[in-house]
Amino acid sequence: MSHPHHSHQHISQATAALNSSGVVAYPTEAVWGLGCDPFCSIAVERILSMKRRSRGKGLILIAASIHQFQPFLVGLLPKYRDQLDASWPGAQTWLVPNNHVAPPWITGGQDTLALRVTDHPVAAALCRQFGGPLVSTSANPHGLPPAKSILKVNLYFRDKLDYLVPGSLGKSRKPTSIKHLVTGETLRSG
């Protein structure tokens, strides 16, 4: 980050877009992501329609710290919370029991919620400035490869984004691994 002021300006503009039901694109650990306020159904609907993604799949939420996920972790056994704490921040997405704080358009009506505390500097800065978790889903229409460049993000979604936060992808080659917190089952290996 050679231009902290420059990057801060991008984060501020992206946050302003998020606060007005906007959809933004930003770099994550392995691929470009689309994000929005998880509690804004209008923004989430826009992302689902941009991606042509079914509602029942559920969406991943990212945060800058485990504290930002606190409301979603109420009722979780301490041993599970410790497990989350030990693996975050990092490229590990966990399916935690749905305590029904997250809206149904995020959980897809399922009994789990997908959460990750990101260690990507841009994604984390965005969550910090926004003041809470954000939707994080790969920037691609359903069935097409995830965007690995700004060029590809623009190719897919040029006129549909409210803001694109510049930056570099993290070092991961593949999307983060997804594990079920309670059963330990791996749903997607990273």
Image: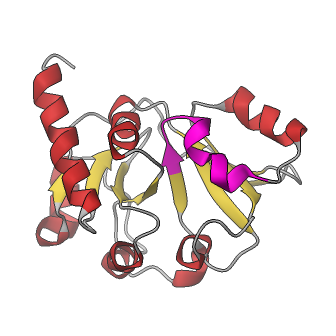
Q: Which residues are magenta?
A: 62-74
Above or below, comparing residue 84 to residue 4 in the picture: below
Q: Measuring 87% from the left and 52% from the top, which residue is drawn there? A: 182
Main SS category, magenta section = helix
Callout count = 0
Task: Between residue 171 and residue 95, name the one nearer to us.
Answer: 95
Which quarter of the picture shows residue 139? bottom left
Is 59 placed left or right of 22 in the picture? right
Which quarter of the picture shows residue 9? top left
Q: What is the image's colouring?
A: secondary structure
Q: Where is residue 21? Give x, y as percent.
A: 28, 69
- Quadrant where the C terminus sits is top right
Above or below, comparing residue 15 to residue 3 in the picture: below
Q: Measuring 72% from the left and 50% from the top, which residue is drawn there? A: 73
Is 66 included in the stretch rendered in magenta? yes
Task: Between residue 186 and residue 81, name the one nearer to us.
Answer: 81
Q: Measuring 17% from the left and 21% from the top, which residue is drawn there? A: 4
Q: Measuring 32% from the left and 35% from the top, which residue is drawn there? A: 122
Is 88 placed left or right of 83 in the picture? left
Is 51 included in the stretch rendered in magenta? no
Above or below, comparing residue 19 to residue 14 in the picture: below
Q: Where is residue 168? Give x, y as percent.
A: 27, 33
Is 141 placed left or right of 111 in the picture? left
Q: Is residue 188 visible?
A: no
Q: Where is residue 130? Give x, y as percent.
A: 35, 46
- Quadrant where the N terminus sits is top left
Above or below, comparing residue 163 to residue 177 in the picture: below
Q: Is residue 46 visible?
A: yes
Task: Between residue 134 and residue 51, name the one nearer to us.
Answer: 134
